[in-house]
Amino acid sequence: MSEVISIPKEVVEKEFYRTTEKFHVIATWVGVVLNLVWFVGDYFVLPDYWIPFLIFRACVSGLTVLLLISKKLTGFSIYTIVFALVLGIAVQNAYMWSVMDLAHLQKHTFAYMALFIGVGMLVLWDIWYSIIIVTATILSNIIFYKIFSPLSIDEFLINGGLLILTVAIFCIFLIRTRYNLTVSEIRSRLQLEQSKHIIEEERNVIQKKNREITDSLNYASRIQKAVIPAESEFTKAFTESFVLFKPRDIVSGDFYWITEIDNKVYYATADCTGHGVPGGFVTMLGLSFLEEIFLILNIRKPDEALNILREKIINSSKTSIENSQDGMDITLCCIDKKTNKLTYAAANNSFFVLRNNEIIELKADKQPCGLFFKSKPFTFHEFQLNKGDCIYTFTDGYADQFGGPNGKKFMYKQFEETLLANHTKDFAQQKHVLETEIDKWRGDEDQVDDVLVIGVKIS
């Protein structure tokens, strides 16, 4: 995500408390037990003071246990209870220091250091807890020193006082730094979880939209397939024929159309501007308009049909000047089955007649069937067919497919060579060869355009 998700401070702190609470509960119980166990050392090291030491330890540990047991009733957090334990031990150690001689003071310095380094890690990350504990430690040491200590100020400070103060301050900075790092880690984790949650929600929305769009496209495809004639319509009109139709998307921007009127076969091979949904809409218009032109308006000349088709496309789409290339490239053929005369008109799409192992290219007008700056009436063409001639009409999708060893276009020259090498075969075989060749050429490349090739043989 481009924007960093902001996690409120209170949320991060709440997560910190939640993830560390169990550890603090265990650590508090351990601290209570160890504070009592260390009484054994007091008995052997300073037997003259073991009773007041025991009273101090019992009070500190007892108060902590009481707070732990009544935690739910009092509402105290485990961190407040830990603070009470550490504060009690700090004051307890200050009293112990005050009654020790120089040798014992030096030894007991390490106990004070352990307090700040070990137990202090549980609460020193909180700045107010840190200030209170350090202040209480200093004050309790001053008070108890004045009342009980036999040592001079110099002896007291040099043999432990300054060291403990230094360790305490150092521990506060060290532990707070670690705390800040932990909070940063928790914030990052929460941001990541929140990001994953948002991404998951967005992914679900996108998947739902994709399913809806795909369902709609599949439905549109079924409608388009129902309107586009079946390949069998060509086999009814011609003894040998094939239709190779490979849409790039679910709906196609290429289409074909066929009808037979008075022993004349009219058929169209068209490539609409765009593919997918935009092209699919234009194909539906084209199919509808061709039906109207031939079956209702009774137009029979291919050039007149294309002129009317162009007007209808322009009027229906309200195409603007900026989109002057919108429309379709189309070949519209009429074959008289009695005379084998071919009449046609074509917008941009030339096509081939194969005769005696030669390719005859029948040219198209260099203009689309749609809005065009230099539009002119479509040209009426006539061509006499012979028995055995093979006619191939097509869109540009076959020749424009990328692939091969260098990822280049298939190109029309290679397309012509494929037709020339296979035009004497059965038309079902021709279709298979053409489909196999283009799939082999494409390989792992995505199909870049709709593919449409129609072949018929004059019998």
Image (cartoon, rainbow, N blue to C red):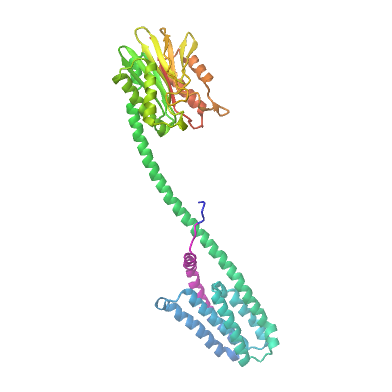
Q: Which quarter of the picture shows residue 368?
A: top left
- Determine the residue positioned at 60% across, 89% down: 144
Foreground of the two, 333 or 308: 308
Q: Is residue 31 magenta?
A: yes
- Determine the residue positioned at 50% across, 10% down: 358
Q: Which quarter of the picture shows residue 174?
A: bottom right
Whether residue 256 is visible to the viewer of this picture, yes or no, is: no
Main secondary structure type of the part rendered in magenta:
helix
From which residue to which does the magenta span run? 5-34
Residue 99, horizontal then vertical, whole percent: 62, 90
Foreground of the two, 448 or 93: 448
Foreground of the two, 436 or 112: 436
Q: Which quarter of the picture shows residue 289?
A: top left
Residue 432, horizontal then vertical, whole percent: 44, 21
- Determine the residue positioned at 56% across, 68% down: 179
Tell me: residue 104, above or below residue 370: below
